[in-house]
Image: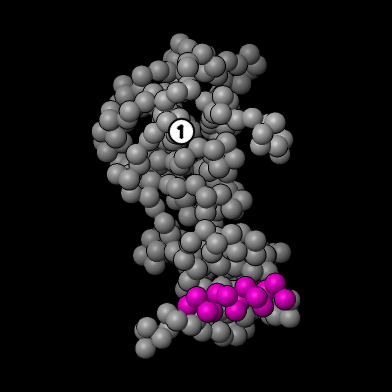
């Protein structure tokens, strides 16, 4: 019976927010439930199609009953069911209860979480990886993932106790890049060992950094860019593994930049030699 379910998903109509299946999906707002079920929520038809095309496992597809006659929705639902995903047809109020939005997307997907095993990271050539130390804000993390995707970074390494990359707010902020940027997670001690074995330049931002972020030679080797915590910056153990400490010059009254902004500024400088608007097109 289990094999049969894998071959073809169930198609079911649900009308109540108190239905046990819907209740279980709503619990995915909790990190613990996401981890226990190895699941997370993603919203929007294009994003879901791109994720499926990228090899991510869609567990359940939900769409608004008001869109049941939409050809694109019907095609996606048929594809999902044929691949073994359950398909739930629900009223908009149910989608709103799941996404916590007054005007929810009409298509929502429940996907299987994917974290990269850091042991599989083998930097070569001019690969760039971003390490985020104890990042707390889901919006910051999502924005950094989107920026990393746009700039051509290879992936992100979360260090220590961090926000969940699969939190709904994070996924929204990535604008789909959650499905394009590999994410690994290491404890501080594991990361220190990882950084010491890095076969390129380990560079970190620090208020005490004596070098302008535009000064180092980034081309010709793999780069590991370490960004500190939003509130306390980079701790001493991580500072010690940096071959180079950099800073972003500031002349205004603000004493710091938002983490996502600072990461974007540094990342685009690190990747500047590899990016060509003439070749790739000037897209904003």
The answer to whether one can see residue 229 in this image is: no
Query: Residue 116, position in %: x, y?
Result: 38, 50
Vertically, is 86 above or below 195?
A: below
Q: Which span of residues is magenta-colored? A: 71-84
Q: Which residue is mark 1?
A: 128
The answer to whether one can see residue 177 in this image is: yes
What residue appears at the point 52 percent right and 25 percent down from the top-left corner?
270
Vertically, is 167 above or below 136?
A: below
Q: Secondary structure at mark 1?
A: strand
Judge by depth and name the residue closer to the eye, 61 or 22.
61
Image side of residue 275 versus residue 130, left or right: right
Quadrant holding the N terminus? bottom left
Quadrant holding the C terminus? top right
What residue appears at the point 42 percent right and 31 percent down from the top-left corner?
125
Indicate yes or no whether the magenta region holds residue 73. yes
Query: Residue 13, position in %: x, y?
Result: 60, 85
Image side of residue 32 versus residue 267, left or right: left
Indicate yes or no whether the magenta region holds residue 35. no
Vertically, is 46 above or below 208?
A: below
């Amino acid at each position: 019976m289990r094999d049969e379910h894998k071959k073809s998903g169930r198609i079911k109509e649900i009308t109540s927010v108190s239905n046990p299946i819907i209740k279980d999906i709503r619990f995915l707002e909790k990190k613990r439930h996401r981890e226990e079920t190895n699941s997370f929520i993603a919203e929007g038809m294009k994003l879901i199609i791109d994720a499926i095309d990228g090899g991510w496992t869609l567990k359940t597809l939900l769409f608004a009953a008001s869109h049941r006659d939409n050809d694109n929705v019907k095609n996606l639902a048929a594809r999902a069911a044929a691949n073994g995903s359950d398909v739930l047809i629900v009223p908009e109020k149910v989608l709103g209860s799941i996404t916590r939005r007054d005007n929810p997307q009409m298509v929502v997907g429940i996907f299987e979480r994917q974290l990269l095993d850091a042991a599989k990271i083998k930097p070569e050539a001019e690969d760039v990886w971003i390490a985020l130390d104890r990042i707390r804000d889901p919006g910051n993390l999502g924005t950094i993932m989107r920026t990393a995707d746009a700039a051509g970074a290879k992936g992100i390494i979360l260090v220590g106790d961090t926000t969940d990359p699969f939190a709904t707010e994070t996924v929204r902020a990535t604008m789909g890049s959650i499905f394009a940027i590999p994410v690994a997670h290491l404890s501080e001690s594991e990361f220190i060992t990882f950084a010491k074995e890095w076969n390129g330049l380990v560079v970190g931002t620090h208020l005490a950094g004596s070098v302008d972020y535009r000064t180092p030679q980034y081309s010709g080797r793999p780069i590991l860019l370490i960004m500190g915590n939003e509130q306390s910056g980079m701790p001493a153990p991580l500072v010690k593994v940096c071959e180079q400490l950099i800073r972003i010059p500031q002349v205004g009254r603000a004493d710091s930049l938002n983490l996502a902004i600072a990461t974007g500024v540094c990342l685009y400088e690190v990747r500047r030699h590899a990016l060509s608007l003439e070749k790739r097109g000037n897209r904003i």
